[in-house]
Image: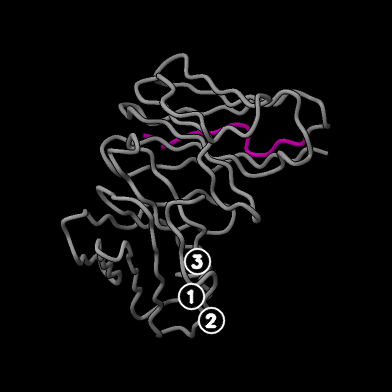
Amino acid sequence: DAGVIQSPRHEVTEMGQEVTLRCKPISGHDYLFWYRQTMMRGLELLIYFNNNVPIDDSGMPEDRFSAKMPNASFSTLKIQPSEPRDSAVYFCASRVNTEAFFGQGTRLTVV
Amino acid sequence: SQQGEEDPQALSIQEGENATMNCSYKTSINNLQWYRQNSGRGLVHLILIRSNEREKHSGRLRVTLDTSKKSSSLLITASRAADTASYFCATDAWAAGNKLTFGGGTRVLVKP
């Protein structure tokens, strides 16, 4: 398996634009997590899914953030409209049982 | 607030020395995991210790867990320059819906 795949690796966008981050989890994994990492706030859990169903989205900072998991092999995290304070590295991770496997992250810069 | 908090935030040691970092958490857990992150990369799982275990070893890694104090420690023995990375603890609790919550991490610099 190729591991958790995230795209794009880097995204630079202007304030106010819509941004969509994508994640393909490892096949057979039933949990999918979206994290955001910044120097100031560390690694924050935004939302996670179990069997494609959102379980806890209490970490989503604002209504500008939304996430979907239409099937077991794909998830998106959308920010609309984007703001400079959304600049961060966004990680997707999947797991079955205990260990989580992380993607390489998407570095988002909003200017 | 984060479930796990690491201490120290940063650690600088010479190659060959041991590195010890601690993690404290707030609520009951089923297991505690340690992850490593190299600069610009995703996190990689290192070791897991279950709530009914007190100590676990994997290669040069030694993890302890004290559930009465809600704390864990990670020891890296005979450190190498390649161990330079950030290390995170993560708590896992069924009562919390099996979500994995990470601490702030310890940045370790191993000088050759």
Q: Which residues are magenta?
A: A1-12
Of the residues under marks 1 and 3, which one precedes in the sequence? 1
Q: Residue sitting at 59 percent across and 47 percent down?
A: A37
Tell me the element at label 1: helix
Q: Which residue is mark 2?
A: B111
Name the residue type under label 1. Ala
With B26 as the anchor, is A7 left or right in this view?
A: right
Residue A60 is situated, as x and y percent measured from the top left of the image, at 58, 32
Q: CA distance from mark 1 to mark 3?
A: 16 Å
Of the residues under marks 2 and 1, which one precedes in the sequence? 1
Report the mark closest to the observer, 2 or 3. 3
Name the residue type under label 2. Lys
Q: Is residue A109 magenta?
A: no
In the rendered structure, are the residues bearing label 2 and label 1 in contact, judged by CB atoms less than 8 Å apart?
Answer: yes
Q: Which residue is mark 1?
A: B81
> Are dots 1 and 3 on a single chain?
yes
Residue B86 is situated, as x and y percent measured from the top left of the image, at 50, 63
Q: Which residue is mark 3?
A: B106
With B71 as the anchor, is B111 left or right in this view?
A: right
Residue B91 is situated, as x and y percent measured from the top left of the image, at 35, 50
With A17 as the anchor, is A105 left or right in this view?
A: left
* A38 shown above or below B80: above
Of the residues under marks 2 and 3, which one precedes in the sequence? 3
> To which chain does the residue with label 1 belong?
B
